[in-house]
Image (spheres, rainbow, N blue to C red):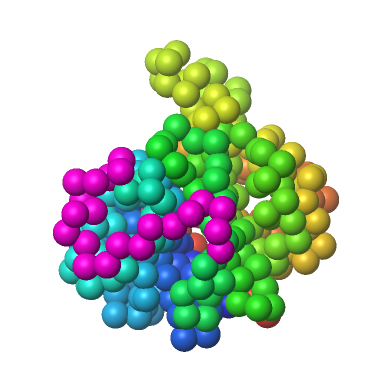
Amino acid sequence: MRFASLGSGSQGNALIVEAGETKVMVDCGFSTRMATARLARLAAAADDLDAILVTHEHADHVGGVFAFARRHRLAVYLTHGTHAAASRGVAALPECRLIDGHSPFSIGDLEVMPFPVPHDAREPVQYLFGDGRHRLGVLTDTGSITPHIVEILAACDALVLECNHDAALLAASRYPAVLKQRIGGRFGHLENSQAADLLRQVETGRLQHLVAAHLSQENNRPELAVSALAGALGCSEDWIGVADQEGGFAWRQLG
């Protein structure tokens, strides 16, 4: 199993996960043209994809999903709540699969476990992926850590983990107070120390990859996120990866 990012941040998100002959995209916050170009950087193409899995209806995650899926005749998997919240784009999809946020399913060689997260969307989920040997956990766009999240992400081989903001930088930012409260609230986004706390609650002995994701360009710094995660793991800072808005990150292999 391997995984890569087309870009991660408030201007657009998309992750690619591959196992055996199966390749899926998680979210697509980019135009069809931009997503196609970013796939090409990974030596991949839309024709390689089997489906798109959606986490929630916010534009930086779903903005490009429906046009891309229609263009390339791809199945789209999303919760009932996300389907309702994004109903205008859903109507013309070639294939729409409604999922239960607590029920696992399979797409080809990939085992998929969606799990609900506290975020200010209709019915948001994140995903745990498996291929029978390895487990990849993806957790972004959550304002707090629940016991269920800890349970789902126990003993992963790889984690893509939100480090959206640094509390001090957010407090000092130009953002209006209501937006600061939303971002820092329990239905907002993970702060660096919250992400580090999650690592202290799960078994990390199997981790081969840890990537900090969904960093705010104004309210965080890569070095702050890396320092927080490395401190929680007791590892070298250069072992921690960072997904950025323009480049995402290149393929990472589990083996």
Image point (36%, 62%), residue name: 97
On the image, the x and y values in percent for residue 72 come to 22, 72
Look at the image and tell me in which quarter the N terminus lies.
bottom right
Q: Is residue 195 magenta?
A: no
- Compared across the picture, whether 42 is left or right of 68 comes to right
Q: Residue at 40% x, 66% y: name it.
A: 25
- Looking at the picture, how far across and down is residue 69, in whole percent? 25, 65
Check the image and report above or below for 156 versus 178: below
Rendered position, 202 above or below 52: above
Query: Quarter of the image holding residue 28?
Result: bottom left
Residue 145 picture quarter? top right
Question: Where residue 24 sits in the image (x, y, percent)?
Answer: 42, 70
Q: Is residue 237 above or below residue 77?
A: above
Quadrant of the drawing holding the C terminus: bottom right
Magenta span covers which residues?
84-104
> In the image, is 18 to the left or to the right of 84?
right
Residue at the (67%, 39%) spot, across then down: 146
Q: Nearer the viewer, residue 173 or 25?
A: 25
